[in-house]
Amino acid sequence: MKFSVTRQPVNEIDETCLIIFVRQQKKSIVLSSFGQAVDTACDKNLSGLIKRKQLDASREHIDVLFEPYGMNCKQLMVVGLGDVEKLTKAKTRKLLGHIMSSLSRRKIEQVAVSPADFAGPDADDPLDEQAQFTQLLVEAAYANQYCYIETKGEVEKKNSREKTKAPAKFTLLIENEKDKGAVQRHVAIGQAIGEGTNLTKNLANMPGNVCTPTYLAKTARAIGRKYAMPVTVLDEAKMKKLGMGALLSVSKGSREPAKLITLEYNGGDKGQAPVVLVGKGLTFDAGGISIKPAAAMDEMKYDMCGGASVLGVMRALGELKLPVNVVGVVASSENLPDGAANKPGDVVTSMKGLTIEILNTDAEGRLILCDALTYVEKFKPAVVIDIATLTGACMVALGQQASGLFSNDDALAEALLAAGDTVGDRAWRLPVWEEYQQQLKSNFADLANIGGRFAGAVTAACFLQRFAEDYKWAHLDIAGTAWKSGSSKGATGRPVGLLMQYLLDNLGKH
């Protein structure tokens, strides 16, 4: 896909399809100044349709006018925004997804659209609204174009590509030349996030017999080569020397060796404390001896979505070249039942030196993450954010709409919440109060790996907090947001957008 930004009279636009937006104001349909210019060029045809109530401004409604009089474009796509005061970022994403699907179905090759037309005349900050719309539009184009084909035959690959074929060219029309730089900047941001998100989806959607810990390490090395990022992969022998008994206990039941993968993006000043992202990379989780029910167990290939999102962010950083230092860490293993696997009641020793009683072998994510959280102290981080499909309890609490957010630092938590609101990938903060630590007490070790029936997402976060006491830390539980089930089964790519927005919002603050 090619994106260009230009200033051009509406009657000279010769792309296959020109998109304009109509909004509902009380009981009236309103055109922006751009829409009025289009109306003038096509001899007031739009005004006539509005007067005759032949246009619908309800959200996501699309009318298409073919060979519009006075215009060079072949189609004029009129998209309803509804009441713009109720148009949230999440609703905007859905709207843009609807538009992209319509363009694919109609096999449109070239599209023109005005970000100012979407922002409308009443925007508080017109340029910022244009820039944000541009970024969301580009991300939506990448999302619509994505299709999983890695393990399909040639016929299905062709069919999948055809169904998701995106326009080859998008032209973003600006009203003022001075706006060009900001719009182009957000095109670049949208492209980087789109590519990073699609990488995350692809890794997560791959079956567990393909996307193993070794495969994730191979992917990390490819990113490192392309974007000149140092990559370190610790094998089990090196992890054993470091005392990572918790992480290694999880991989004992698998024939696939565990990997601790580190990528370093050095875009900021030398010596600047990095943001460290730690992703849970369980490439398949059967639960170990505490085996999961058979129904939907195939979806446990998605237990590495946290690690996949870290790799997606690192790729996006490589594309965008942000002036910040970021370390991406993926702790990767499988969790399977075997004669050598962890047993309920076993006690293991973490890299931090704390002993852990394993009461449930299906609470393995925190075991691999706790050693990774200790390991990253070596980078002297500004902040550490871990991302994990950690608990079903978080999904029970928040559903599939929001990720759970836990933190020992209010400013970090607020920054992540704000980033999520900006991009429509929201999180909700839950507590990590000291009182919850009582649930992790063990008669036979320093702490247990589960805290009982109640507050499961909270006690899991409190477990991790014990290993993140020496730096500012946040934990994103993405169990409900990382993938969809049912007929639309597949990875969402969340929270790549949230994490990238956090980095963009906080440049120079670390």
Image: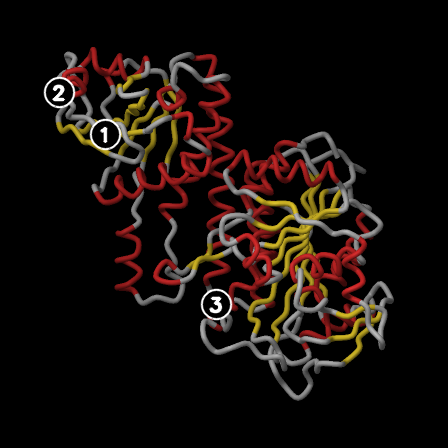
Q: What residue type is labelled 1?
A: Met
Q: Give the residue pinned by disc 2.
A: 52
Q: In which quarter of the image is residue 363?
A: bottom right
Secondary structure beneath label 2: loop
Dot label at residue 373: none
Q: Nearer the viewer, residue 156 or 305?
A: 305
333 vs 409, left or right, is: left
Question: Residue 172 appears at what percent x and percent y?
Answer: 37, 25
Tell me how many marks there are: 3
Say if residue 263 shows up in the picture: no
Q: Give the residue pinned by disc 3.
A: 299
Query: In the image, what residue occupies the spot 32% across and 20% down?
Result: 25
Q: Which of 249 and 61 is in front in this view?
A: 61
Q: What residue type is labelled 3?
A: Glu
Indicate the quadrant containing the N terminus: top left, top right, bottom left or bottom right: top left
Secondary structure beneath label 3: helix
Q: Give the residue pinned by disc 1.
A: 77
- Mark 1 or 2 closer to N-term? 2
- Mark 1 or 3 closer to N-term? 1
Secondary structure beneath label 1: strand
Question: Residue 323 appears at what percent x and percent y?
Answer: 67, 33
Indicate the quadrant containing the C terminus: top left, top right, bottom left or bottom right: top right
